[in-house]
Image (cartoon, rainbow, N blue to C red):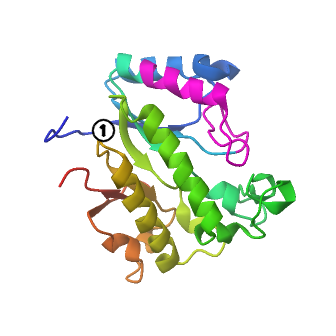
Amino acid sequence: GYNQSYFGVGENLAWAKWGGKAGIEGWAPYLQNLSSSGANYIRVWLTDGGWDDMAVETQLGNYSLANTDNIDELLTLAEANGIKILMCTESFNFFCSKPKPTPCLWDECVYNEKNGGFLSSAGDFFTDERAKSLYKQRLQYLVSRYAHSPAVFAWEFFNEGDIVDGYTPAGFAQWTQEMAQYLRSIDVYKHPISTSFCCTHSATDPSSLTLCLPMCLCVRSQISCIARSRQ
């Protein structure tokens, strides 16, 4: 609620398949065990591609009904167990083409023109107007469908955004600011807004304008930047 403190204790669960089980059956034991241990927080990836059972945009501009139903069930399960969720909408993996062992999946990304998308390079995701429009469309869908849930703690744009192809602090900050302003305008519940970095130097670089975004309060976990939820 408004003007209430929240101290999250938990883990980056990201994706879960307890005992190899798919869907909500693969998540339930984790949440139940976390709750019984006193935890009240998890971070979940909603990334595109066939990554897990919570991936939203599995086709360009189209969302998996099966997976979005799974998110509904996960939020219900989380609420029942007193757990709040940081909803991570995207990860560097699909916008990174570095060779292994880095887990880069640009070759599988739905935005890649080789897969029927329209981007010739992964880094264009942050500057191409159509790509930005589709991401805002995804944010609108997520907010419309899930923002009412008491289990939603915050939104996170990117997991380790500084590993994407062509990353620059200023470029990433500009994209983040545009998306944060849009998300703030559509989320009447005013959830906190976050993004994350892989490397400490990315978040402490004086040229990283992400640290200076309006209403932005930076804290370290991985390295994350969380916007003040209520002003």
Q: Which residues are magenta?
A: 49-77
For the point 50% across and 67% down, which residue is it? 199
- Determine the image quadrant of residue 216: bottom left
Residue 224 shows up from this direction? no
Q: Name the residue furthest left.
A: 3
The residue singled out by tag 1 in the image is: 8
Position of residue 107 measured from the top left corner of the image (x, y, whole percent)? 81, 57
Q: At x 64% / y 63%, what residue is drawn? A: 130
Residue 73's x, y, as percent?
Answer: 51, 20
- Say whether residue 207 is visible: yes
Question: In what quadrant of the picture does the N terminus appear?
Answer: top left
Q: Is residue 110 above or below residue 223?
A: above
Q: Is residue 52 magenta?
A: yes
Q: Residue 150 is drawn in which quadrant?
A: top left
Q: Secondary structure at mark 1?
A: loop
Relative depth, front residue between 86 and 141: 141
Q: Is residue 76 magenta?
A: yes
| Residue at image point 42% right, 77% down | 208
Q: How far across and down, in percent of the image, does residue 175 sit?
A: 49, 68
Which one is in front, 225 or 67?
A: 67
Residue type, label 1 = Gly
Residue 37 image point, x, y percent: 35, 22
In the rendered image, the quadrant that contains the C terminus is: bottom left
Vertical placement of residue 114 versus 73, above or below: below
